[in-house]
Image (tube, helix red, strand yellow):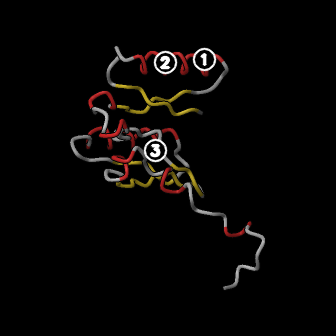
Amino acid sequence: MLLVGIPADENLALFKYLASLRERFSDYGYEVVGLPCPVSSYPPLPGGYVSALGLYAISLMVNHRVLVSQYGHGLEGYDEQALEVFSSALPDYEVIPINCSVVANGGGAVNCTAIGIPDITNLGGTGTG
């Protein structure tokens, strides 16, 4: 299964690109599930950074749980829709909403906050202080 964002604006080059990816993966036999992706309404941030507001594919799956980014700020309907898509697509997983409204302004979401978390069981030490 592949979860892919579907931009709200069909005229965006990103919409057309993601549509071609969805079609290609479907041709390879993958089940492709669409997530809301209302990103076209957000202008670039100072310094050329792009906000991650509305990017629900930036989630994190760990230990049979899916941490799903939530943004608020007028996106509550999309937030709810994303939770419903994940719950339906992954019925055996616990779906947990995570408020990412602040970190999204830096271009990231829930998975980005976990990048620097080490696997302490694989550090080669004894695990004692």
Q: Is residue 129 left or right of residue 109?
A: right
Number of other residues with Cα within 10 Å of mark 2, as a class: few under 14, some 14 to 19, many 20 or more: few
Q: Are marks 1 and 3 in contact (CB under 8 Å)?
A: no
Residue that numbered label 2 is attached to: 17
Which image quarter: residue 51?
top left
Residue that label 3 marks: 87
User: Marks 3 and 2: in contact by CB < 8 Å?
Assistant: no
Instruction: Judge by depth and name the residue closer to the eye, 10 or 91.
Output: 10
Image quadrant for the C terminus?
A: bottom right
At label 3, which amino acid type do we have? Ser
Q: How many marks?
A: 3
Can you tell which mark lies on residue 47? none
Q: Amino acid at mark 1?
A: Arg
112 lies above or below 6:
below
Q: Amino acid at mark 2?
A: Tyr
- The reply to whether dot 1 and dot 2 touch (C-beta < 8 Å) is no
Q: Quadrant of residue 107?
A: top left
Picture residue at 54% right of the left edge, 21% below the top:
22
Give the mark toward the camera: 1 or 2: 2
Residue 24 is marked as 1
What whole-number distance in Å separates the C-alpha atoms at marks 2 and 3? 26 Å
Tell me the residue at 58%/27% (across/down).
31
Q: Residue furthest front?
A: 47
Of 36 and 95, which appears nearest the observer? 36
Q: Position of residue 89 (x, y in %)?
A: 51, 38
Give the CA separation, mark 1 to mark 3. 25 Å
